Image (tube, grey):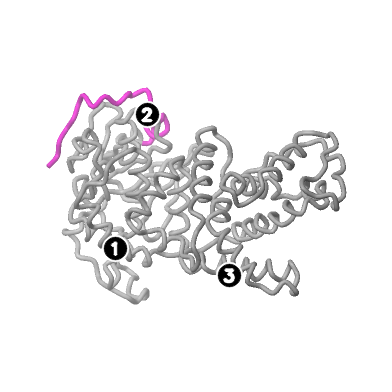
């Protein structure tokens, strides 16, 4: 049921001027257009949205005819990017509800040609470009709190799915049949965890039951998309809460499979550290978190190798083993796998305290030291070793290596301190 809310409490001054301009030009051309989705939700919560998306009844080609700098992107879900300098506003055409247009079930990608809406034999949406009206568009969205439409000129809020009441009661609820909606797009499982952790919402009972019933559908998500969604899940400043929710729903082993026992205390420290860095606007990288999650796997695999083979061989074999465990679940970019290997290899260099100046100059030194720091906090590395390396970075004075009379004294380090990302 369509509900119009005129006193929503949204501050019109927080509306992005470029999104408002896009709406104004589309309406001047005779089309309907509204700010939609997560941006409206964040405004209702008093948060500043990261992006302002626009929904309209104009077809992609018609949108492009209104704006000189616009292009259609995507085949699975066609949207239009309208450019304002370096900024992009996403504009999507209203799509139809699921009951209006029965999609062709197919397992052959050749059969997708010419089809507006296609689902796989498992029920996963492969293509969704069947256009509809505003109400149909609302009903095909994922969560009730993401199905808002806001008019920045008349300051009117439209709610078709009861999302306004859900937001007031701090409840996260899927639109329609929860299991059917998760099967259509299993990524919604991860999206539910992310939104719940970020906004402090409780997952509604039927939605939670559906997540537990459909959790194995995560394996149907493409490896690359699963990686991207895990980045969003754990790099949004609420990594610890997101991880806890994933544990509660028995999703961790599906996302981060491992044949050995994880060092949960070390992972907890890394998640807390990641959230702290995000809160302080310091750089973070998902590759570092992966190196922590799979450090125990790497370490055990390294220790199984014959010492006679030498460090380089043992390191390479252990790294391959740990990363192959992860690759069984998601696609890992080359830079991320190289990053993790470098961080793992640095643990041996940091523990040996040989050639400290050379170690300090390595590209991944800071990330390697950060892992050593976390390990010292949970007791899997010597705190004296951590403190020595910290002092070595901070000071140009003579710093003798800890716990070793045999090792050569450290030379004066370079006059700089690395502040690289992790």
**Residue 352 shows in the view:** yes
Query: On the rendered structure, is 168 left or right of 28?
Result: left
How many C-alpha atoms fall within 10 Å of the one at disc 3: few (<14), some, or many (≥20)? some
Q: In terms of sequence position, does the residue under pointer 1 or pointer 3 come before the other?
A: 1
Residue 2 drawn in magenta:
yes
- Alpha-carbon span between mark 2 and mark 1: 33 Å
From the viewer's perspective, is the residue at label 2 or at label 1 nearer? Answer: 2
Q: Nearer the viewer, residue 100 or 194?
A: 194
SS for callout 3: helix
Question: To which residue does mark 2 refer?
Answer: 15
What percent of the width, then of the height, locates residue 361? 78, 47
Q: Please say if 255 is above or below 376.
A: below
Is 394 drawn above or below residue 117 in the view shown?
Answer: above
Q: Is residue 252 left or right of residue 277?
A: left
For the residues marked 1 and 3, what is the alpha-carbon distance in whole angstroms?
A: 42 Å
Residue 128 or 279: which is nearer the viewer?
279
Q: Which range of residues does the magenta coloring cover?
A: 1-22
**Quadrant in which residue 111 is drawn:** bottom left
Q: Which mark is residue 321?
A: 3
Residue at 23% x, 57% y: name it: 210
> What's the CA distance linking mark 3 and mark 2?
49 Å
Q: Which mark is residue 116?
A: 1
């Amino acid at each position: 049921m369509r509900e119009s809310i005129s006193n929503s409490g949204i501050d019109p001054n927080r509306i992005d001027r470029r999104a408002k301009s896009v709406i104004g030009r589309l309406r001047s051309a005779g089309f309907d257009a509204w700010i939609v989705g997560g941006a409206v939700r964040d405004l209702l919560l008093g948060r500043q949205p990261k992006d302002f998306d626009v929904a309209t009844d104009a077809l992609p080609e018609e949108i492009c005819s209104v704006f000189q700098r616009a292009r259609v992107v995507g085949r699975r879900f066609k949207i239009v990017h309208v450019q304002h300098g370096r900024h992009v506003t996403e504009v999507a055409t209203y799509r139809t509800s699921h009951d209006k247009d029965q999609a062709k079930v197919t397992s052959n990608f050749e059969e997708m040609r010419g089809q507006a809406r296609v689902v796989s034999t498992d029920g996963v949406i492969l293509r969704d470009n069947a256009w509809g009206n505003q109400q149909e568009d609302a009903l095909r969205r994922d969560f009730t709190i993401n199905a808002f439409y806001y008019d920045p000129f008349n300051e009117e809020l439209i709610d078709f799915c009861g999302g306004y009441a859900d937001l007031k009661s701090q409840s996260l609820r899927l639109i329609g049949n929860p299991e059917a909606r998760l099967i259509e797009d299993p990524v919604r499982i991860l999206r539910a965890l992310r939104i719940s952790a970020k906004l402090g919402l409780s997952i509604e009972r039927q939605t939670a039951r559906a997540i537990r019933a459909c959790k194995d559908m995560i394996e149907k998500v493409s490896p690359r998309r699963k990686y991207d969604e895990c980045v969003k899940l754990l790099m949004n400043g609420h990594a610890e809460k997101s991880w806890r929710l994933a544990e509660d729903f028995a999703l961790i082993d599906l996302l981060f499979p491992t044949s050995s026992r994880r060092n949960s205390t070390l992972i907890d420290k890394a998640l807390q550290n990641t959230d702290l860095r995000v809160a302080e606007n310091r750089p973070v990288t998902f590759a570092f978190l992966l190196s922590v999650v799979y450090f125990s796997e790497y370490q055990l695999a390294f220790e199984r190798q014959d010492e006679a083979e030498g460090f380089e061989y043992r390191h390479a074999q252990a790294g391959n083993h740990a990363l192959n465990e992860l690759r069984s679940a998601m696609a890992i970019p080359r830079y991320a796998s190289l990053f993790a290997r470098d961080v793992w290899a640095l643990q041996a260099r940091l523990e040996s305290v040989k050639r400290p100046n050379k170690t300090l100059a390595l590209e991944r030194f800071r990330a390697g030291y950060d892992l050593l720091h976390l390990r010292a906090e949970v007791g899997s590395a010597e705190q004296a070793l951590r403190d020595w390396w910290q002092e070595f970075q901070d000071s140009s004075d003579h710093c003798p290596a800890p716990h070793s009379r045999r090792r050569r004294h450290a030379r004066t380090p370079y006059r700089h301190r690395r502040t690289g990302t992790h």
